[in-house]
Image: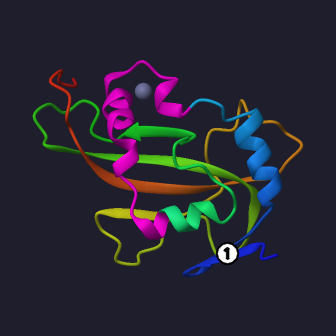
């Protein structure tokens, strides 16, 4: 069974069964649903249509669940009247980065970018497993009638 993924200059090793257990036991609620702010509400309303197919395939390989982002955040959280907000966020999986650097690579992805990242909020994670993330960056329409700011 394949347990490594290469994404441009990065390679991760993963444990699919452990990831499935992580989503069953720890990541029970999507991050944006666990927050009450309006940016998270805007994200949560649209999460089912944000991700391109290649991203969903990548996330599925180590056992990640696209309905359960670990956390999403709005870079444009204070700005009113923007049609789109730039969001970032992480999906977790059990594994580790074994090659490449923990940086957003410059590979021409524009509307939706993603890469492996080892820096993300970990305070509430179990410590006995190595956990890695897929970080993403996306332009998300503002669809709520309520405005941020
Ligand atoms: Zn929030």
On the image, numbered disc 1 is attached to which residue? 5
> From what the image shows, is residue 7 above or below residue 84?
below
The quarter of the picture where the C terminus appears is top left
Q: Quadrant of the N terminus?
A: bottom right
Quarter location, residue 11: bottom right
Q: Quadrant of ligand 1?
A: top left
Provide the residue span drawn in magenta: 30-55
Q: Residue at x 35, y 27 (%)?
A: 41
Of 41 and 73, which appears nearest the observer?
Answer: 41
9 in relation to 80, above or below: below
Q: Residue at x 76, y 62 (%)?
A: 96
- Furthest residue in direction top, as rendered: 36
Residue 9 on image: x %, y %: 58, 81
User: Splitting the image into 4 quarters, where does residue 116 fall?
Assistant: bottom right
Residue sitting at the far left: 81
Is residue 90 one of those drawn in magenta? no
- Position in image of residue 59 (x %, y %): 58, 61
* Tag 1 secondary structure: strand
């Amino acid at each position: 069974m394949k347990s490594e993924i290469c994404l441009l200059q990065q390679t991760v090793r993963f444990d699919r069964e452990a990831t499935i257990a992580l989503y069953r036991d720890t990541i029970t609620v999507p991050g944006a649903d666990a927050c009450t702010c309006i940016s998270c509400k805007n994200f949560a309303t649209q999460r089912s249509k944000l991700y391109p197919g290649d991203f969903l395939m990548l996330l599925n390989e180590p056992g990640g669940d696209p309905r359960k982002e670990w956390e999403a955040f709005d870079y444009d959280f204070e700005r009113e009247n923007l049609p789109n907000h730039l969001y970032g966020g992480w999906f977790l999986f059990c594994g580790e980065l074994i090659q490449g650097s923990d940086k957003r690579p410059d590979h021409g992805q524009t509307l939706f970018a993603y890469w492996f990242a080892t820096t993300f909020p970990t305070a509430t994670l179990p410590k006995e497993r190595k956990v890695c993330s897929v970080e993403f960056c996306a332009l998300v329409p503002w669809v709520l009638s309520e405005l941020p700011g």
